[in-house]
Image (spheres, helix red, strand yellow):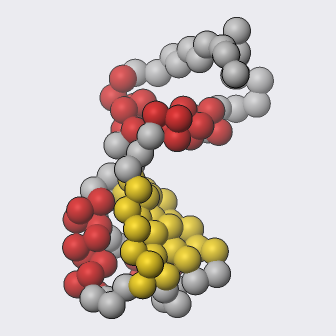
Amino acid sequence: DQGRVSIEDDKVSFCSRLSSSEVSFESSRNLSDFNSLPGMKRIEKKGSLIRLSTNSPNDTVLALLQTDPNLQGLTVTKPSLSGALASYRDQQPAGEETVA
């Protein structure tokens, strides 16, 4: 795959996408139980797997462990450039993406 990606966005907005980390773990709790965690951007649940997108992974994990010190399958994933570009692409309205 070769090509060029041109992003017309201010650096602060784009970099904020890069700073988002994913925290995942197993839980039977409701998603609403996690809304007040620090740094939260997005929450999703598939079966018992919870995925949190956060700007503050350390604070999010500390708060999680305070509420449930026996979390199962806790994983923290740092952001990647390809993930940020994919996120940016997915947020664009149809017809706005140009690949040269």
Quadrant position of residue 63: bottom left
Quadrant position of residue 59: bottom left
Q: Is residue 39 above or below residue 87?
A: below
Q: Is the C terminus in the top left, top right, bottom left or bottom right quadrant?
A: top right
Q: Is residue 70 above or below residue 75?
A: below
Residue drawn 48% across the image and 60% down it: 42
Q: Residue furthest right?
A: 95
In this view, the residue in front, 63 or 82, is 82
Task: Where is residue 90? Give x, y as percent.
Answer: 65, 39
Q: Residue furthest top?
A: 100
Q: Residue furthest front?
A: 1
Residue 17 appearing in the image: no
Residue drawn 51% across the image and 16% down it: 8
Residue drawn 40% across the image and 38% down it: 18
| In the image: residue 47, left or right of residue 73 | right
Total numbered badges shown on the rendered structure: 0
In this view, the residue in front, 93 or 19, is 19
Task: Where is residue 96? Give x, y as percent.
Answer: 70, 22
Residue drawn 29% across the image and 67% down it: 60
Task: Where is residue 5? Give x, y as percent.
Answer: 59, 17
Q: Is residue 8 above or below residue 31?
A: above
Q: Is the N terminus in the top left, top right, bottom left or bottom right quadrant?
A: top right
Residue 47 appearing in the image: yes
Task: Where is residue 85? Give x, y as percent.
Answer: 54, 32
